[in-house]
Amino acid sequence: MQINLSPFWAKMILRLNPFHRLLVMCKGYGEDYKNFTELVWQDDKYLDFYDKNSYPKFQLWLS
C-alpha cells in the first residue's frame, strides 16, 4: 500500500513513528529520481523536505 504524502506529513510521520511499521519513502534522494528510498529519522532529520526540486515526491508505505 502506497500513499502520497505532503512534505509536512512525511516529516511528521518519520519523526513520530515509534514502531517503524510505517516507511516514509522519498523519490530524488541521493539523486535517484527513478526509485523511492526509505528515510530514517536519525539520518534524515535535517533533510529539506520542502525542496520540491531535490525531493519531488514522498510516499507512505506499510511494512
Image (tube, rainbow, N blue to C red):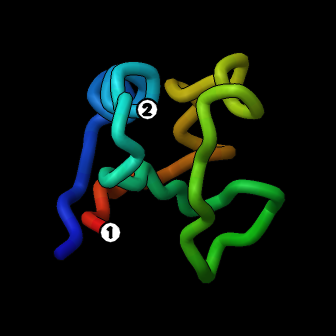
The residue sitting at 30% across, 64% down in the picture is 61
Q: What quarter of the picture does the C terminus occupy?
A: bottom left
Label 2, residues with CA under 10 Å away: few <14, some 14-19, many ≥20: many
**Could you tell me the amino acid type at mark 1?**
Ser
The residue sitting at 65% across, 71% down in the picture is 33
Q: Position of residue 42 (x, y in %)?
A: 70, 27
The residue sitting at 40% across, 55% down in the picture is 23
Give the image quarter of residue 28. Answer: bottom right
Give the image quarter of residue 49. Answer: top right
- Tag 1 secondary structure: loop
In this rendering, position of residue 1 left or right of residue 50: left
In this rendering, position of residue 27 left or right of residue 58: right
> Which label is found at residue 40?
none
Work out whether residue 7 or residue 41 is closer to the camera in this orientation and state it: 41
Q: What is the count of numbered marks?
A: 2
The residues tagged by marks 1 and 2 sit, at their Cα atoms, a distance apart of 14 Å
Q: Residue furthest bottom?
A: 34
In this rendering, position of residue 27 left or right of residue 20: right
Q: Position of residue 3 (x, y in %)?
A: 18, 60
Work out whether residue 33 or residue 26 is closer to the camera in this orientation and state it: 26
Sequence-first disc among 1 and 2: 2
Decide: is 34 above or below 42. Answer: below
The residue sitting at 80% across, 62% down in the picture is 31
Decide: is 36 above or below 58. Answer: below
> Which label is found at residue 14?
2
Work out whether residue 29 or residue 56 is closer to the camera in this orientation and state it: 29
Nearer to us: label 1 or label 2: 1
Q: Position of residue 7 (x, y in %)?
A: 38, 31
Q: Which residue is mark 1?
A: 63
**Could you tell me the amino acid type at mark 2?**
Leu
Q: What quarter of the picture does the N terminus occupy?
A: bottom left
Q: Residue furthest front?
A: 19
